[in-house]
Amino acid sequence: MEQRILLIEDNPDITRVVQYELEQAGYRVLTAPDGITGLTSARENAPDLVILDLGLPDFDGAEVARRLRKTSSVPIIILTAMDAIDRKVNLLEAGADDYMTKPFHPEELVARVKVQLRHQQHGEVITIGALEIHPQKRLCSYNGHEVRLSPKEFDLLTFLARQPGRVYSRQEIEREVWNGELPSNSNVVDVHMANMRAKLRDLDGYGVIRTVRGIGYALKTP
């Protein structure tokens, strides 16, 4: 399946060059000219990697990285005209995986994209107590035993695991996992939660998924 790269850049010339180089390398490229549009695109399209300009017209690129990190572990490469070491450290602390200083060679950017995607493909593991999730392999285990989840159950559990302890409303879950396509008054979320609970309970995973009455669901922290 074609990997998707989200390029958040307000300079049309840079956008055009980078988009061309990435498409030539076989990637599908989504573009956004500012932070708000970029965050919306990231939420709706779930890109495999984000290339983020630091100097955006609406707000600082580091803030975009921080907001992305609240719900996603997508690799982020930041483009910046600043070369100060303390600024680079701040970018990494904000959630960036790599950065490039302008001006840069598009070929080098493509090479760094390939490195980050390779790391993402083989390296990410989400561990919360006895629960272990491998998003790229789409494998889930509890206490070392595989939890056999349906595709949507896996997506749902992974979504909750990105921020364990945070309570998500049914509306947030519907929007993020089902792209807001469920009919009103649907009980699909509750049914999937019940199914996951039963599968985890079979492996002594009691209380992994927490219901907050009147609000929604959360993944219990260890």
Image (cartoon, rainbow, N blue to C red):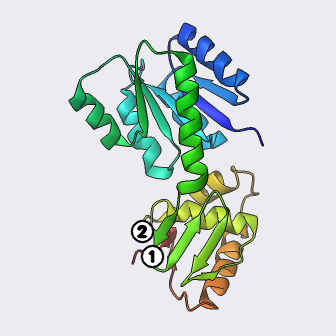
Up-down: is 18 above or below 127?
A: above
Q: Secondary structure at mark 1?
A: loop
What x and y, as percent, mark residue 217? 53, 70
Q: Is residue 210 visible?
A: no
Number of other residues with Cα within 10 Å of mark 2, as a class: few under 14, some 14 to 19, many 20 or more: some
In the image, residue 163 sits, relative to residue 53, either above or below, namely below
Residue 65's x, y, as percent?
A: 42, 38
Q: Which mark is residue 165?
A: 2
The residue under label 1 is which amino acid type?
Lys
Residue 40 bears which disc, if any? none
Residue 220, numbered circle? 1
Q: Residue at x 75, y 70 (%)?
A: 150
Kind of residue at badge 2? Gly
Quadrant of the drawing holding the C terminus: bottom left
Looking at the image, can residue 122 be seen?
yes
Q: Earlier in the sequence, mark 1 or mark 2?
A: 2
Q: Is residue 116 left or right of residue 93?
A: right
Instruction: Please report contact status of discs 1 and 2: CB closer than 8 Å, yes or no.
Output: yes
Q: CA distance from mark 1 to mark 2?
A: 5 Å
Q: Determine the residue positioned at 41% across, 74% down.
A: 221
111 vs 141: above or below: above
Q: Nearer the viewer, residue 164 or 120?
A: 120
Residue 194 placement: quadrant:
bottom right
Label 2's element?
loop
Q: As rendered, which of 136 and 107 lies closer to the eye?
A: 107
Say which of 89 and 61 sits in front: 89
